[in-house]
Image (spheres, rainbow, N blue to C red):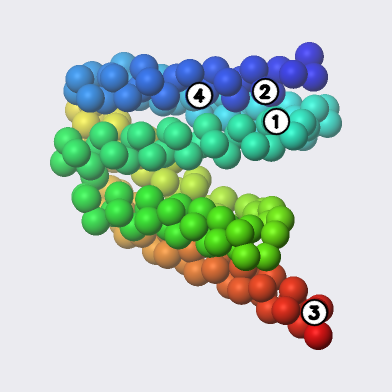
Amino acid sequence: MRQLPNVLTLVRICLVIPVALELHAGHYRNAIGLFLFAGLTDALDGYLARRFDWRTRFGALADPVADKLFLVTTFIILALSDRVPLWLMIVALGRDLWIVTGVLVYRILRGQFEIRPSVWGKLSTFTQIGYLATVIVHAAGVDLLAPILEPLTWAVAALAVLSGLDYTRQGWIRVRTRQEGRH
């Protein structure tokens, strides 16, 4: 049972391709069902890992990778089909590229760097998932959520920028602390 959260994470990773295919084909009703099921596995694996102390190194690494695979794939497909503004996809994915580049540069120049999710980062990811789910539901023909799409678009952009700046600040503090420790 200890591996159940990891199995759920792997299921989520395996769902990336079917969701992508359904989105690409314009089968938004099918895509939203799979997308929501993937979200359920994400919530459940985190809950089980914390509740029963079933945390593993694999889970700590695979869970955010699964989230990013879902977000990147969904953003790209929805932007290419004009469901998501291209500029928003660039801001959201640019933030991730900025963070990954910063971590890689730090590791090359300074050594080990383990990034911890910040409140802003978690809020940004949560908002992106909610936004993409809303876009898919709207694309499936449910107009009830249409009034919140534009405010959500701006919230996703603002939180992506804020969390990117927050991670940059954290990295800069780490660099400064390490430099001061050498003197």
Depth check, mark 3 against mark 2: the one in front is: 3
Quadrant including the N terminus: top right
Q: Are marks 3 and 1 in contact (CB under 8 Å)?
A: no
Q: Helix, strand, or loop for circle 4?
A: helix
Quadrant in the rendering for residue 129: top left
Look at mark 2 in the image and give the residue it sits on.
Answer: 6
Q: Residue at x 65, y 37 (%)?
A: 61
Identify the mark nearer the N-term, 2 or 4.
2
Report which residue position mark 1 lands on: 58
Q: Is residue 129 above or below residue 102?
A: above
Q: Label 2 vs label 4: CA separation?
A: 11 Å
Residue 22 coordinates in the image, percent (x, y): 28, 19
Residue 155 vs residue 41: left or right? left
Amino acid tagged 2: Asn
Which comes before the other along the chain, label 3 or label 1? 1
> Percent position (x, y) of residue 34?
41, 19
Q: Position of residue 103 (x, y in %)?
A: 58, 58
Residue matched to label 3? 182
In front of the other: 145 or 14: 14
Q: Nearer the viewer, residue 39 or 108?
A: 108
Q: Residue at x 25, y 37 (%)?
A: 78
Residue kind at label 4, given as amino acid type: Ile
Mark 3 crowd level (few <14, some 14–19, many ≥20, 10 Å Cα): few
For marks 2 and 1, the one nearer the N-term is: 2
Disc 1 marks a residue whose amino acid type is Phe
At x 16%, y 41%, the residue is 82
The residue that disc 4 covers is 13
Q: Is residue 33 visible?
A: no
